[in-house]
Amino acid sequence: MFKVVVCDPISEKGIEILKNEKDIIVDIKSSVDKKELPLHLKDADAIITRSSTTVDKEFLSHCENLKVIGRAGVGVDNIDLDEASKRGIVVLNMPTGNTLAATEHTMTHMLNCLRFMPNANYELKHKHIWNRKKWMGIELHGKTVGIIGMGRIGSRVAVRVMSFGAKVLVYDPYIPKERATKIGAKMVDTLDELIKSSDIITIHTPKTEETYNMIDKEKIEKMKDGVILINCARGGLYNEKALYDGLKSGKIWALGIDVFDKEPQTNHPLFELDNVFVTPHLGANTYESQVRVAEGIAKSVIDALKGRGYENAVNIKMEEEEISEVGKQFLGLAERMGSFLSQYVKSFIKKVTVYPHGEIESCMNSLGLFTIVGVLKNMVDEHVNYVNAPYIANERGIEVEQKIYKKRTEFKNYLLIKAEYDDGKTLEIGGTVFEPNKARIVYMDGFDMEIELTGNIIVFKNYDKPGVIGKVGLILGKHNINIADFRLGRKKDLGEALSFIKVDQEVSDSILKEILNIDGAISIAKVKL
């Protein structure tokens, strides 16, 4: 028999699924005070939570028999994944149950911005004013809708706005163009192209270092006058100060926003504006989505307890006898190298080939898995883990292959990863582990160097001539950017050099552009690991 404790309220449909299993005892503790809750978990085999239960080290110390944690939703910020993994506890979430709810919520905000229905409703019901002229609206038909991020939600929004007769532009450098054209949308190559051409812009990306404040004052200035902006994805993707200024000036016709940089949010300058429509993070709040989430997590918990599968597991327990200590060091390196590739390329990666050499050949498949997890974390708008990564890669049309590295190398253990993208372009990076916790990248596209893949890194390619690197240092110094480490590789036959410049803080795009304008510069990118 297995005991499942439900710590937070979930739909009765999920409870019914659990109760219908003959060998599962269901204990509902959603009304118990959170301070007292751990006292009821000593013999629990599984728990089901939502966001209001904090599953930290102290909480888990009371769970002597716990095998599975089921999170009825997407986010797992309230769960100490490291501690759960150390205890051998599988953590599951339910990332897809709210897709339709979030899609329709986006459409609701979009239509409200076009027709100002909440304002008209309030004025008529509460002020008893019949004023048709004041609430003259705009039609969605014939407009160009720009969608930033073409994941599960973005793609569904695209289909729905096209059913209204709107045109759709898509910017997502991490998906193949065919995914957009297949549904009748047009893929654009740059964010600026989408921004300048769209009447309405809705954003559906993950919140990362790259996407945080990605729509700022500079981007808004490039938009059409009277643009409509929607954010039902993550708080902080739009710079909120820039939104306020754009709305006050009339540059932005209206804003529909469900998420904020800091939540809960009850007193924001945006609230004072009549052309702003706000909701308190309601994207997933439909009865149907809560049923789907509850049913899904109940089935996943049952499967995990009975050893039938671990769908949507967000952690992985490494078996000591399967992968050596050296292999584990390379797994972490593989994930960082994958993250480096996707951040550096900033384009749809069609194929990833993983080439191990030495003792690590025995964990070749795991190296491929960890690599693609690193690649996908910067590419998709959903939680990536070691269980769902292969499925997401397949869904996106990304091929993953493992081959033994057969060329000569000076390293006892060596990992080369090759990415193929943009109609035949390739990028190769190689890395090794010199000693415990000393993993380094040692090769990139013909350049030999050695640097640890952590922190903020500027990757700068230039013609190998005097004075170029000195000018880079001057520019960074001018902007109070401190250089923590600097590594240089050279191709003397081509007269080119490649620099890895580790800095103490993130460098803005404007500083990168300034460096790229140096005479002799070829390319520049920033990576954060």
Image: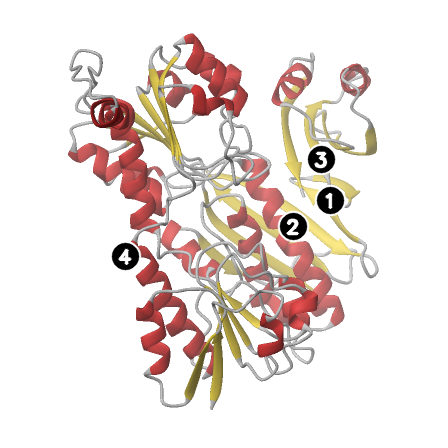
Q: CA distance from mark 1 to mark 4?
A: 42 Å
Examine the rendered structure and indicate whether residue 507 appears above or below residue 39.
above
- Label 4 residue SS: helix
User: Which mark is drawn over residue 288?
Assistant: 4
Sequence-wise first label, 2 or 4: 4
Q: CA distance from mark 2 to mark 3?
A: 13 Å
Sequence-wise first label, 1 or 2: 2
Horizontal relation, residue 503 to residue 226: left or right:
right
Horizontal relation, residue 6 to residue 457: left or right:
left
Q: CA distance from mark 4 to mark 3?
A: 44 Å
Q: CA distance from mark 2 to mark 4?
A: 38 Å
User: Which mark is drawn over residue 454?
Assistant: 1
Callout 4: few (<14), some (14-19), or many (20+) C-alpha neighbours within 10 Å? some
Where residue 5 sits in the image (x, y, percent)?
A: 49, 76
- Label 1 residue SS: loop
Q: Label 2, on which residue?
A: 336
Where residue 381 sits in the image (x, y, percent)?
A: 45, 45
* Disc 1 and disc 2 in contact, CB within 8 angstroms: yes
Res 184 seen here: no
Q: CA distance from mark 3 to mark 1?
A: 8 Å
Q: Residue at x 57, y 34 (%)?
A: 210
Callout 2: few (<14), some (14-19), or many (20+) C-alpha neighbours within 10 Å? many
* Disc 3 and disc 1 in contact, CB within 8 angstroms: no
